[in-house]
Amino acid sequence: MFRVMEFRDGHGKVVEDLEQVAPPPADVLRWIDLRGPVAADLERLRAHFDFHPLALEDCAHFDQRPKLEEYRDHVFLVTQGFSCPEERVRHPAVQELHTFLGERYLVTVHEEPVAPLESVWLRVAAEPSLLGRGVDFVYYLIADGMVDANFPILDRITDELDEIEDEVLASPDREDLHRIFELKRHLVEMRKVLSPQRDVFGLLAKRGDPRVGERTALYLRDVYDHLVRINESIETNRDLLGNALDAYLSAVGQRTNEIMKYLTIMSAVFLPLAFVVGFFGQNFYDLPFFPDWMHSDKLMWGMLVTCFSLPVGMIAWFKHKRWL
């Protein structure tokens, strides 16, 4: 589905005529947005703009890596970002935008609605002078919105990491381990997308392309700076995840050691008791030096005192040694 916005003689308007899906006249700036492209839409772009077949092929498959490709009269850009409407970061969705940037036209192609692009469209429709500053500036607004949308996601991951660390130190649970690996997977995915995108904007802001004005290049450098901060935040969160994982394993190991210690102490306490009870449970009627020992009240009381005093004495000794 195409939609077109134009800026001419200080005025902007939204055009619904598909005939406007073409390079603009010399005195017009034009933004063409295509959502959910099909073969016929891409063929229209090829026929009117003479875009390179490789770029149009990329627009038919939304699984591209962030990149910048320079052609004769335009630049082809793939920009990506993440969105996550959930309060907890569970399934961040990748938003992919393909852009053809010419001197007087901007063509954006995307499969699903891109929230930052929709916001910029409404803003430019209400304030056409933004389009009058150049189509490169409109692209900056879109890219800046897509990049800045990653900050809240990373902030939520950081907050959740703090919670996981507290829970792990207090009472480690297997669910914490699952969540640590889930967040680690999200960070790896974000790094895979946003790390090459940082290089793209660094190149776009510094290369002096004639389709990017000097004033807009300054703004693109700001986007590059945001991407640098985002990548640093991703690396920091990955380090924190590693620390949380180490804390979890250490806490589980410590708890296992505590359990083994108490089991060992219980075994040590019951071992002499088992000997005493086993000794007096022998099936012998005669015992040297103790005639008729099976009917001796003295031996019975001696056994009972021994069974009581041994555990008490051993526990007192363990506490004296600070094993308890």
Image: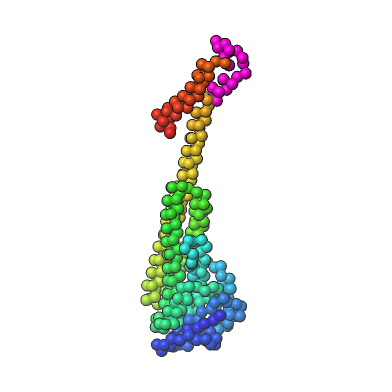
Q: Which residues are magenta?
A: 274-294
Residue 200 appears in the rendering:
yes
Depth check: give the residue in front, 157 or 71.
157
Depth check: give the residue in front, 315 or 297.
297
Residue 74 appears in the rendering:
no
The answer to whether residue 283 is above or below residue 257 is above
Residue 18 falls left or right of residue 13:
right
Residue found 38% across the figure and 69% down from its top: 222
Quadrant hosting residue 143: bottom left
Residue found 50% across the figure and 36% down from its top: 260
Relative image position of residue 42 (x, y in whole percent): 58, 78
Depth check: give the residue in front, 202 or 245.
245
Residue 262 falls left or right of residue 42:
left
Quadrant of the snapshot with the C terminus = top left
Relative image position of residue 76 (x, y in whole percent): 50, 74
The answer to whether residue 177 is above or below residue 322 is below
Q: Would you say residue 315 sits in the magenta stretch?
A: no
Relative image position of residue 98 (x, y in whole percent): 52, 73
Relative image position of residue 43 (x, y in whole percent): 59, 80
Residue found 43% across the figure and 71% down from its top: 145
Quadrant of the snapshot with the N terminus = bottom right
Residue found 60% across the figure and 19% down from its top: 282
Query: According to the image, what is the colour scheme of the structure?
Result: rainbow
> Most extreme residue toward the bottom, as rendered?
9
Q: Would you say residue 290 sits in the magenta stretch?
A: yes
The answer to whether residue 120 is above or below residue 313 is below
Callout count: 0
